[in-house]
Structure formats: C-alpha cells, structure tokens
Image (spheres, rainbow, N blue to C red):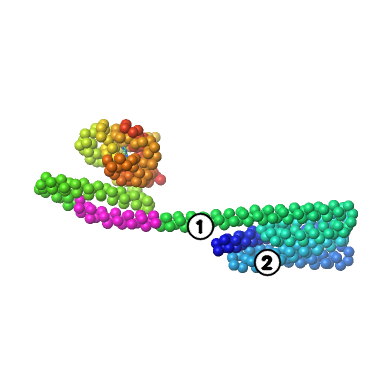
Amino acid sequence: MVKAIASEELERRLLVELGSRVRLGGFVYPLLLVAVALQVDFPGSYFWIFWLGTVLVVLAAIWRTMAANRAAHATTNWRSIREEIRVSSLLLTLLMIGLTSIALAAAPHSDFSRLILFGLISWTALGCNVFAPDLSLAKVFNLVSMVPFAIWCLSVRDEFGWFSALIFGISWLFLWIAAKLANTHLKKMVMTQIQLESQADDLRNARDSAEEASRARTQFLANMSHEIRTPLNGIIGVTDLMLGTELSQEQRELVGIMSQSGNHLLTLVNDLLDLSKINAGKLMIESVEFDVRHLLDETCRPIQLQAESKGLEWHMQIRKEVPQLCLGDPVRVRQVLSNLMSNALKFTDRGGVTLDVGMVDGKHMRFIVEDTGIGIESAKLDGIFEEFEQADRSTTRRFGGTGLGLAISKKLVELMGGRIGVQSAVGQGSVFWFELATSGNRS
Ligand code: ADP
C-alpha cells in the first residue's frame, strides 16, 4: 500500500517536472517554422497549407502550456493532465514533421533541405531530453521524428540518402538509450527526494512529540517542586523550633537528623525547580546595581564557618581593580558562587579553599574557586557540567549530591552572558572559575 502511494507520488512528481520543462518550449516550434518559411519558395497551395499548419502549431502550443501550468498544482486529476500534455505534444510533433516535410518537398535537393534534416536530429535530441520524465512520450516522439525521415532518405536512393538514413538510425537508437537513462536517473532523484521528505516529516513529528513530552515533564516538575516545597518548609521550620526547645540528648539528635534531611531535600527540590525553569526558558535574569564586596562577604560568611568547622584553611582575595558596584543579578551570582564553594568544601578533606576575585580585560569579573581536594579525572572533566553528571559512583556514595549543581551553575552563567570552566588534577585539587561582564547581561 505504502509502495503504491510512493509510486503514484513518483508519477505525479515526474508529471510536475515534465510540465515545468514543456511549459514554454512549444512556442519555439512556430518560430522555427517561420525561419523555414523565409527560406523556401512554396509552390501553389503549399504556401497556405504551411501557414495554416503554423497557426495550428501555435494553438497546440497554447493548449500544452495551459495543461503544463495546471500540472504544477495537480493533485487528484494529474493523470488526465498528463494525457493532455502527451496528446498536445504529439500533435505538435506531427504538425512539425508534416510542415517540415512540406518544406522538404518544396526544395528536395537543396543544401537547405540537408540543413533541415540535420537540424531535425538536434531538435529530436532536445525533445527526448525534455520529455525524459515521461519515457513513453519520449520514445514515441523519438520514433515519430526520426523514422519517417529515415524512410524518406532511403527513398532518395543516392549516397547522401543512404548516409543520412544511417545517421538517422544511429541517432534514433542513441536518443532512445539516452532518454531511458535520463528517465531512470530522474526517477531515482525524485524517489530520493520523496524519501527524504518523508524522513524529514517523521523527524519533525518526533521532535514535536519530544518537545511536547519535555514541556509536560518540565511543567510536572515545576508543579511538583512547588507543591513539595510548601509542606517541606513547614517541616523544616517546626524542626528548627523544636531544636530551640528543651530536648533530651537522643531527641536532639533525631530532630537534628530530621532538620538536616529536610534541608537536603529542600536543596534538591530547589535545584529541580531551577533546572525546570531554566529548561523551559522561564528563568528571568535581573540586571540591577549591586555592591560586589557586600555580596561576597554575605556569601562567604557561612562557607568560612563550615571551612573552620571542617578544619580547613579559608582565604578570600578581592583584587583592588574590582569595582565597588556592578550591574547584574546578585541572587544568581550568589547561587553560582555558593555552589562552587560548597563543592570545594565538600570534596576537600585537607588543605583549604580559596576564592580569588579579579578582572580580565577591564570589563569582565573573574571568580576563581580553588581547593586542595580530591580533584577530578581529566576524562570526566568535559561532562562535569552536564545534568546528573558526577565524577564517579564512589564520590556519590561518600559525599552525596545530585549532580545538578554544576549544570545549573553553567546554565545560569550562560544566561548572564558569561563563561564557566574548570581545571583539575586527581589528588591535587580543582580550580573552578567563571567570568561575568561588570556591565550586566548583554546577551
Ligand atoms: P553534586 O555535587 O550535587 O553531585 P554538582 O553538579 O555540583 O553535583 O557536581 C557534580 C560532580 O562534580 C560531583 O559529584 C563531583 O564528582 C564533581 N565535583 C564538583 N566539584 C568538585 C570539586 N571541587 N572537587 C572534586 N570534584 C568535584
């Protein structure tokens, strides 16, 4: 069934191709006839027959052009249009042959008649090429144009006659093969085009359904994250209140675990919400003026406390060329910095963590977070900013985490028009950096 549809479509497209090829060609015929008429002295009524035939050629050419125009948009009735093109083309050919014969009969042995005969071969070659999309038409055209003249040449019974008949015969065979090859080639091309279009359709449909599924997933994640966050905040709030009350040692430990787990879950839900917002293109980046040193102080205070409690060294360096005020989204800058610094602390057991803030090319601020922790294998570095990507399973088991923080950081930095990167060596530590324009997001 599918094959039948494809072969019908193939035939229809070949007709469209035929239509585009023959649309204007018919009007060359009367011009040729006028050129012939100017060279020939017609005896008696031949003159009028010739001109009447030329008028009929013009009418047939108009008919064929009209049919060819309709072929371009033909959908259901294309077969009848093909018949019209075939019949009008054959009519044109017969008229041309008839009128050329009249011209030859009027001047049978002149140089001009020889010119006409060989002109005919070029004309037939051109026609076979033009009619190649419809092999039957090309074959009939070739036969009708060549054979009568070959017979006529034989009837002349002189050396020129034999020779011309031979040339006509060879030309007929050659053009027959050429038309067949051209037709096969065209069919292959059109078939490939049909297949490519159908594949493009399939791909478009697959893309649409994937996009639809992704939208649904994003919406679901956004809704769920939102719904989960509200009761979770309630739980965390209550556990914090409970920790402020009088509790036994055991109760304090249990409530502490509850609070820690609640906070962990909240981070995860927030990450998912952020990611779904970013992926849905709904996360808006602000552009407001903020105090860089103030933001860094606020962001680093908890990190410094955590570093001290873990027995790690903590250094922060803000270079003097860093401006006091800059334009951007302080909430998102803080989110990226916190994520990089929390990771640095999480994956470092000895040594320390350093934050270095400076300028590059006078317009971009560069934040560098360096640690002396476990480092990352070079093979894993490329994919480290992908969603749910973690260096290895043992790291996940030992340190926990979701593999979303760096993916979110990368997307946020890019939304702010900046760049992010990393260098690392296993056992020696990692250097994560990002750069942002001090004049805000210009992307
Ligand atoms: P998470 O830390 O929640 O797993 P991230 O996206 O923040 O997710 O980090 C992805 C992975 O990159 C981590 O699991 C870890 O393997 C690796 N990684 C990130 N930062 C560091 C770091 N400073 N040192 C070593 N490995 C790191």
Is residue 235 inside the magenta stretch?
yes
Tell me which label, 1 or 2, sits earlier in the chain: 2
Q: Quadrant of the N terminus?
A: bottom right
Proximity of marks 1 and 2: CB atoms separated by less than 8 Å: no
Q: How many marks?
A: 2
Is the residue marked 1 within 8 Å of ligand 1, measured from its CB?
no
Magenta residues, dominant SS class? helix
Which amino acid lies under the numbered mark 1 shown in the image of this protein?
Asp
Q: Quadrant of the C terminus?
A: top left
Q: Where is residue 309 in the image (x, y as percent from the top left)?
A: 20, 37
Q: Name the residue under label 1.
A: 201
Q: In this view, does 100 lie above or below 370?
A: below
Q: Give the range drawn in magenta.
A: 213-236
Residue at figure coordinates x 41%, y 57% from the top left: 212
Q: Is mark 2 on a helix, strand or loop?
A: helix
Q: Residue 83 carries which label?
A: 2
Specify the quadrant of the image occupied by residue 194: bottom right
Q: Position of residue 99 (x, y in %)?
A: 81, 63
Q: Is residue 324 visible?
A: yes
Residue at figure coordinates x 25%, y 53% from the top left: 229
Which amino acid lies under the numbered mark 2 shown in the image of this protein?
Glu
Q: Is mark 1 on a helix, strand or loop?
A: helix
The residue lying toward the viewer, choosing from 307 and 349, is: 349
Ligand 1's quadrant:
top left
